[in-house]
Amino acid sequence: MSTTEGVSAAALEAAIIEKLKATHVELKDTSGGCGQMFEAVIVSQEFAKKTSLMRHRLVNSALKDEISRVHAWTQKCFTEEEWERKKASEASGA
């Protein structure tokens, strides 16, 4: 059963790091601070050899309690190698 309290960005980030062994997390509260809408970039080797759908299901399952307390949740999942390639591509302007 969900509540209307939301979740703090700090608590959500801590859960992502702990439950998904994330090495990098970028979390943006898009709700204006009430903890109801989040966009996340998650980098973890837990995503290796998994399709995008499998990665999202893994995140949703691991963060079931936290996600149930928010209105909207958006995630982008990368392995460490994918993240490094993305950063290099952005830095080169490609």
Image: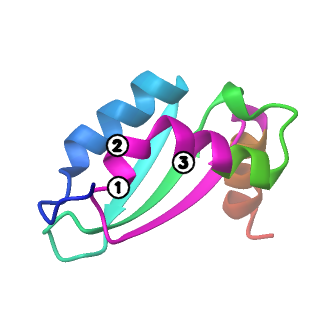
Amino acid carrying label 3: it is Asn
x, y percentage for residue 75? Answer: 55, 59
Residue 54 placement, left or right of 8: right
Q: Which region of the structure is painted magenta?
A: 57-81
Q: Earlier in the sequence, mark 3 or mark 2?
A: 3
Q: Quadrant of residue 53?
A: bottom right
Q: CA distance from mark 1 to mark 2?
A: 5 Å
Say which residue label 3 marks: 60
Residue 51 placement, left or right of 41: right
Q: What residue is at 15 percent from the left and 66 percent from the top?
A: 4
Say which residue label 1 marks: 68
Q: What residue is at 24 percent from the left and 76 percent from the top?
A: 31
x, y percentage for residue 38? Answer: 36, 64
Q: Please say if the residues under marks 1 and 3 sit with CB atoms less than 8 Å apart.
A: no
x, y percentage for residue 30? Answer: 30, 74
Q: CA distance from mark 1 to mark 3?
A: 10 Å
Say which residue label 2 marks: 65
Q: Please say if the residues under marks 1 and 2 sit with CB atoms less than 8 Å apart.
A: yes
Q: Secondary structure at mark 1?
A: loop
Q: Secondary structure at mark 2?
A: helix
Q: How many residues crowd mark 1 within 10 Å: few (<14), some (14–19), many (20+)? A: some
Q: CA distance from mark 3 to mark 2?
A: 9 Å
Q: Considering the image in quadrants, where does the N terminus appear?
A: bottom left
Amino acid carrying label 1: it is Ser
Magenta-colored stretch includes residue 84: no
Image mark for residue 76: none
